[in-house]
């Protein structure tokens, strides 16, 4: 595959607000007419609006509103990237009830990669044209700031142009606690070692009523938000997520995205929101059915509508499956995430999606959904290649 050349974003959709035309296109039911009018006017939606969008039976009407917002922001472009996930260890101290990935060090299937294994995996993805590695892991005392700093220096020395998107806010909080350092110092040291941006994991559901039940042992909502605020203040971009389809209710999801929206108003540091569909298999919540297709699409659409200040919403095919992810592109999503190659967190929890998708297949899925696939790097610069990717 040829070396990527980065360029500016394509021109944003050249939309001219035509309220009458857009209102007509939305065909909103009478009892959502006021929300539709706000959407068309580009006005901010409230907590109550979010609740009504969750409760309304007409899912397609909600989807049409989200699709209008998506189109105004991105036209017919759907982004993807070439990336790989590396999870250096599954040993984790937190024991979150939704997780099928974490292990105790004494478990027979606990694993711990050495630095060379991380470099080997990165070498494979660089050879395949990847522009990004996404590195997150369990909270393990030996995988501390020194280990990860060496890992990132080693990666940068070997693959200088590979973007290192690493460490959830939960991991940053863990390092701070482990070494008795401030969040700022931890972030500064990781950036000095090569950290380029942060993924959005660990947010789960912020509301304490649910958070205490699903992940009581890890950082709370305020600390998660504080860490992203501090990272943004240092110029790092990050993503944000929400894990849905377990114990939470509509009000918890609305509360969650409004907390993200409030931080984004302050910092503008979030690039993308990723709704994460809960997979119950092999977890302490395996008695739950997991989210329905309707909930997958509704969460995507309502989040697009409420998060008016976050530019991108991902249809994360690993968790949604290829088919629902494709349909989510008509419910507000404009980013298909990446080729991924080797994801363990949700595959351990029963995800039936493949471990990786080829670029050709990703592009096919996007085109078949009526959109134009555009390769991006982690920071949403467009990547242009001389030869078509495989
Ligand atoms: O934080 C854990 C979730 C997250 C399960 O920032 C589960 O670009 C479903 O954050 N079922 C990690 N979800 C993944 C993540 C992510 C993924 C892709 C892109 C980005 C990005 C971030 O996965 C965890 C947790 O919320 N998770 N267990 C489960 N059983």
Image: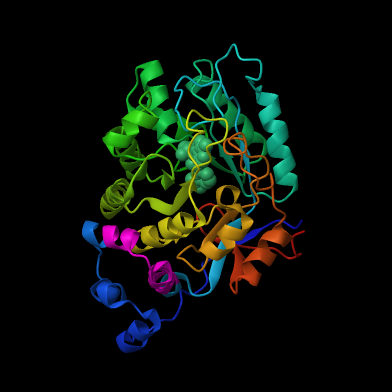
Q: In this view, does 316 lie above or below 29?
A: above
Would you say residue 61 sits in the magenta stretch? yes
Q: Position of residue 84 (x, y in %)?
A: 64, 43
Q: Which residue is drawn at the image coordinates 38% and 69% (left, top)? A: 58
- Of the pair 162 and 51, the residue shown nearer to us: 51
Q: Is residue 353 above or below residue 328?
A: above
Q: Position of residue 351 (x, y in %)?
A: 61, 42
Per the rendered image, the range of residues in magenta is 50-70
- Residue 42 visible somewhere in the drawing: no
- Residue 6 visible somewhere in the drawing: yes
Q: Quadrant of the C terminus?
A: bottom right
Q: In which quarter of the image is the N terminus?
A: bottom right
- Of the pair 225 and 146, the residue shown nearer to us: 225
Count of residue discs: 0
Q: In which quarter of the image is residue 214?
A: top left
Q: In this view, does 147 lie above or below 224?
A: above
Would you say residue 79 sits in the magenta stretch? no
Q: Residue furthest top?
A: 106
Q: Which residue is drawn at the image coordinates 65% and 64% (left, top)? A: 365
Q: In this view, does 284 lie above or below 271?
A: above
- Of the pair 18 and 96, the residue shown nearer to us: 96
Query: Left or right: 176 with respect to 276?
Result: left
Q: Which residue is drawn at the image coordinates 75% and 65% (left, top)? A: 388
Its colouring scheme is: rainbow
Q: Position of residue 49 (x, y in %)?
A: 25, 62
Examine the residues drawn in magenta and state their main secondary structure. helix
Q: Where is residue 272 in the image (x, y as percent from the top left)?
A: 44, 54
């Amino acid at each position: 595959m040829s070396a990527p050349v980065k360029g500016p974003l394509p021109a944003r959709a050249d939309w001219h607000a035509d309220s009458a035309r857009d209102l007509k296109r939305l065909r909103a039911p009478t009892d959502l007419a006021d929300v539709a009018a706000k959407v068309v006017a580009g006005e901010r939606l409230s907590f109550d609006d979010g609740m009504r969008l969750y409760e309304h039976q007409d899912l397609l009407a909600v989807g049409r509103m989200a699709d209008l917002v998506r189109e105004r922001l991105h036209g017919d472009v759907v982004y993807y990237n070439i990336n790989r996930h590396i999870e250096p260890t599954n040993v984790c101290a937190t024991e979150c009830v939704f997780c099928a990935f974490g292990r105790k060090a004494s478990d027979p299937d606990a694993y711990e990669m050495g630095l060379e294994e991380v470099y080997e995996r990165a070498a494979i993805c660089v050879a395949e044209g990847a522009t990004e590695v996404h590195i997150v892991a369990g909270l393990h005392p030996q995988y501390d700031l020194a280990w990860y700093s060496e890992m990132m220096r080693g990666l940068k020395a070997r693959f200088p142009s590979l973007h290192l998107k690493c460490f959830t806010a939960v991991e940053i909080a863990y390092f701070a606690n482990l070494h008795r350092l401030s969040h700022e110092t931890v972030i500064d040291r990781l950036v000095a070692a090569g950290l380029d941006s942060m993924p959005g994991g660990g947010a789960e559901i912020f509301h304490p009523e649910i958070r205490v039940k699903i992940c009581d042992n890890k950082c709370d909502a305020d600390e998660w938000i504080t860490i992203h605020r501090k990272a943004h203040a240092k110029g790092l971009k990050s993503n944000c997520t929400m894990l849905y389809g377990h114990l939470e209710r509509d009000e918890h999801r609305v509360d969650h995205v409004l907390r993200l929206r409030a931080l984004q108003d302050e910092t503008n540091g979030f690039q993308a929101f990723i709704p994460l569909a809960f997979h119950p298999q092999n977890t302490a919540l395996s008695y739950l059915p997991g989210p329905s297709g309707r909930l997958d699409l509704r969460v995507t659409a309502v989040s697009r509508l409420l998060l008016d200040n976050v530019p991108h919403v991902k249809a994360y095919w690993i968790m949604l499956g290829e088919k629902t992810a494709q349909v989510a592109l008509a419910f507000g999503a404009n980013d298909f995430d990446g080729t991924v190659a080797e994801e363990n967190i949700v595959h351990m929890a029963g995800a039936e999606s493949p471990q990786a998708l080829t670029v050709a297949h990703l592009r096919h899925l996007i085109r078949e959904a009526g959109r134009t696939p555009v390769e991006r790097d982690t920071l949403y610069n467009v990547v242009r290649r001389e030869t078509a990717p495989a």
